[in-house]
Image (tube, helix red, strand yellow):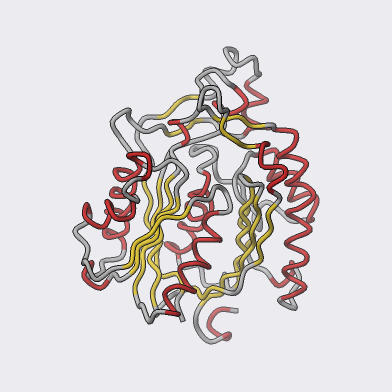
């Protein structure tokens, strides 16, 4: 069965200090710290693109979990902001850049904050259906390309970064079937303005959607899996803002250790949010993390949940 073996990541070194520009944005430092929660935002250099971000994430993965690049037979890239207008598909450019085998399936998917959960499910299904053994799932959404500077509804929220997840038939975490929902009628809540090509977000819509639909989906999903929140060791929620995470925790009666907010120095990384959040738990190999619930929600509007379970006898991981 195809599952998660390791995760690599990259954040640009240049960061924007949100606290320092609070007054310019018409906000208090307390609002930045307690509501938005993003103290600083990594931003790519002007000459850095999706391929550059992914290449650096790949280098990080290689440094953590050495593997034979020749063994990789699947490459999937989740991005909404591809280089070169998306033609050719950036996964093909990445295959060449990383000098991976030509005996490799490569394709892009376009999804936002739910993209990691979708990507895991797509990768598992595609790889298992075609007898593939080793895959790379990249996420990279440099929203700085589409943010209008000074539009504080978006300029205070999004960071740039990339991750890559090594998927294999010798995983550390197995992937369970996910659950997926879409409300395209509300897609205008996070969209591109046709007039200027810049990101537009209706924060009240996004907050209301998050508070209603995310807990409902999680409850429905766990019921389908014959589980409760008490059976889950860690709940990783898309890091949309500290205010969203705090309110979701309150609504679902979860404590901060079980459903952490850990994005104060990264901002909202869109499709990279969940793998970046998951990465340190894999690196630490925490023994009592048997079941982890992933929940991504945002652009679309789209929301998705998936349970991942640690590989090994229950006695070893309980």
In this view of the protein, which residue sits in the foreground, 21 or 216? 216
- Residue occupying image coordinates x 36% and y 37%: 12
**Splitting the image into 4 quarters, where does residue 289 fall?**
bottom right
Q: Where is residue 37 shown, x and y percent of the image?
A: 61, 34
| Residue 77 located left or right of residue 100 | right
Q: Where is residue 216 shown, x and y percent of the image?
A: 79, 58
Q: Does residue 41 lie above or below 174 as drawn?
A: above
| Residue 235 located left or right of residue 146 | right
Q: Quadrant of the C terminus?
A: bottom right
In this view of the protein, which residue sits in the foreground, 169 or 179? 179
- Residue occupying image coordinates x 56% and y 32%: 192
Q: Does residue 261 lie above or below 145 as drawn?
A: below
**Splitting the image into 4 quarters, where does residue 153 fall?**
top right
In this view of the protein, which residue sits in the foreground, 69 or 9? 69
- Residue occupying image coordinates x 61% and y 56%: 236
- Residue occupying image coordinates x 40% and y 79%: 130
Q: Where is residue 32 shown, x and y percent of the image?
A: 62, 27
Q: Does residue 179 lie above or below 49 as drawn?
A: below
| Residue 250 located left or right of residue 306 | right
**Total of numbered circles in the picture?**
0
In this view of the protein, which residue sits in the foreground, 56 or 104? 104
Q: Where is residue 62 shown, x and y percent of the image?
A: 27, 60
């Amino acid at each position: 069965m195809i599952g998660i073996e390791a995760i690599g990541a990259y954040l640009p070194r240049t960061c924007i200090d949100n606290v320092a520009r609070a007054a310019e944005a018409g906000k208090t430092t307390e609002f930045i710290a307690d509501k938005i929660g993003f103290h600083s935002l990594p931003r790519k250099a002007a000459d850095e693109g999706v391929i550059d971000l992914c290449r650096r994430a790949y280098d990080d993965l290689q440094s953590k979990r050495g593997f034979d690049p020749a063994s990789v037979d699947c490459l999937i890239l989740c991005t909404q902001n591809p280089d070169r207008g998306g033609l050719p598909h950036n996964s093909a450019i990445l295959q060449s850049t990383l000098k991976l085998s030509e005996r490799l399936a490569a394709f892009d998917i376009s999804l936002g904050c739910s993209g990691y959960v979708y990507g895991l499910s797509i990768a598992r299904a595609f790889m298992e259906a075609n007898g593939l053994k080793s895959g790379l799932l990249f996420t990279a959404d440099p929203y700085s390309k589409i943010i209008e500077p000074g539009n504080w509804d978006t300029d205070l929220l999004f960071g740039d970064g990339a991750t890559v997840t090594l998927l294999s038939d010798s995983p550390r975490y197995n992937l369970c079937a996910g659950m997926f929902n879409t409300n395209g009628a509300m897609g205008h809540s996070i969209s591109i303005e046709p007039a200027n090509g810049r990101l537009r977000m209706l924060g009240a819509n996004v907050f209301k959607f998050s508070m209603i639909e995310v807990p409902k989906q999680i409850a429905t999903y766990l019921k389908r899996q014959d589980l409760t929140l008490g059976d889950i060791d860690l709940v990783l929620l898309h890091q949309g803002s500290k205010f969203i995470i705090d309110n979701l925790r309150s609504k679902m009666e979860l404590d901060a250790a079980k459903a952490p907010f850990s994005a104060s120095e990264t901002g909202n990384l869109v499709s990279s949010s969940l793998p970046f959040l998951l990465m340190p738990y894999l690196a630490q190999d925490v023994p009592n993390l048997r079941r982890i619930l992933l929940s991504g929600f945002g652009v679309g509007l789209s929301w998705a949940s998936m349970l991942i379970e640690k590989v090994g006898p229950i006695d070893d991981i309980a």
